[in-house]
Image (cartoon, rainbow, N blue to C red):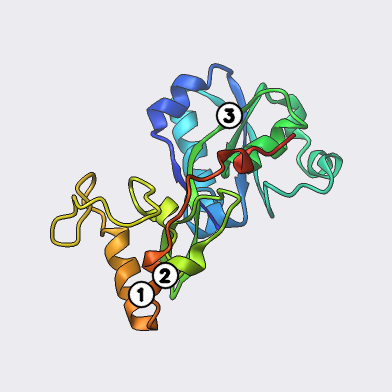
């Protein structure tokens, strides 16, 4: 699941110079997170109308990041052709996918991380999509995604009472230690990790 949050309305309005807007929501992650499903799209429609914009129409695609046929989207939503711009309430991948078909596309959300759901709890920043997964060595807790400094070889020493010194999130390395201790795998902490090959993150060629 892609974790996104809605941009501040004034930021959306500042970017949106066009008058006639079509709003597109996403039926997957954005709906589950309540940032781009039908209720949020309708709320956005109201807000834009109050701000003086004209809303050509709106829809919630089953998945904004996976569009088998733009022709079909247009046939179901002909008002898209009449609009000056699209406002997409999905993650950045959905915005990129739609931008392949449409000229002027604005994101209404900021994409933050790859996360998930567990027992109805949103799990943020579970994966940094680095292209070099070694999470098994850390008891399933990714230090690149969850340690504010992305440290691979142990804690920085700045945590206070289990809280990160940068933003008071729980120290990821505290959690890694406790998990490996529980698993009887503390020897993993003795593995020295070389600097990561950041070239592995280069994609989209």
* Label 3 – label 1 distance at C-alpha: 47 Å
Q: Residues within 10 Å of mark 3 (few under 14, many from 20)?
A: some
Looking at the image, residue 195 sits to the left or right of residue 84; the answer is left
Total marks placed: 3
**Tag 3, which secondary structure?**
strand
Residue 126, how many percent across, how many down?
46, 59
Which residue is painted at 73% across and 33% down in the image?
Answer: 79
Residue 167, how many percent across, how many down?
23, 46
**Tag 1, which secondary structure?**
helix
* Residue 24 in view in this figure: no
Pick the residue in front: 27 or 149: 149
Q: Residues within 10 Å of mark 2 (few under 14, many from 20)?
A: some
* Label 2 – label 1 distance at C-alpha: 5 Å
Which residue is painted at 44% across and 41% down in the image?
Answer: 6
Residue under label 2 = 188
- State if disc 1 and disc 2 touch (CB < 8 Å): yes
The numbered disc on residue 106 is: 3
Quarter of the rendering occupied by the C terminus:
top right
Residue 86, how many percent across, how many down?
64, 30
Quarter of the rendering occupied by the N terminus:
bottom right
**Comes first in the chain, label 3 or label 1:** 3
**Tag 2, which secondary structure?**
helix
Pick the residue in front: 169 or 178: 178
Which residue is painted at 18% across and 50% down in the image?
Answer: 158
Q: Quadrant of residue 81?
A: top right
Residue under label 1 = 186
Looking at the image, residue 103 sits to the left or right of residue 18; the answer is right
């Amino acid at each position: 699941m892609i974790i996104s949050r809605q941009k501040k309305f004034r930021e959306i309005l500042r970017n949106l110079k066009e008058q006639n807007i079509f709003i597109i929501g996403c039926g997957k992650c954005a709906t589950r997170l309540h940032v781009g499903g039908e209720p949020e799209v309708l709320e956005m429609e109201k807000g834009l109308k109050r701000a003086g914009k004209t809303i050509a129409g709106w829809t919630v695609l089953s998945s904004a990041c996976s569009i088998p046929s733009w022709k079909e989207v247009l046939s179901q939503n002909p008002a898209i052709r009449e609009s000056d711009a699209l406002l997409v309430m999905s993650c950045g991948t959905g915005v990129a996918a739609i931008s392949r078909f449409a000229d002027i596309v604005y994101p209404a959300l900021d994409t933050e991380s790859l996360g998930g759901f567990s027992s109805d709890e949103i799990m943020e920043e579970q994966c940094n999509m680095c292209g070099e997964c070694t999470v098994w060595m850390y008891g399933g807790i990714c230090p690149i995604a969850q340690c504010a400094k992305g440290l691979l070889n142990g804690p920085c020493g700045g945590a206070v009472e289990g809280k990160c010194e940068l933003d008071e999130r729980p120290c990821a390395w505290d959690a890694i230690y406790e998990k490996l201790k529980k698993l009887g795998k503390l020897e993993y902490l003795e593995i020295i990790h070389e600097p990561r090959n950041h070239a592995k993150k280069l994609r989209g060629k």
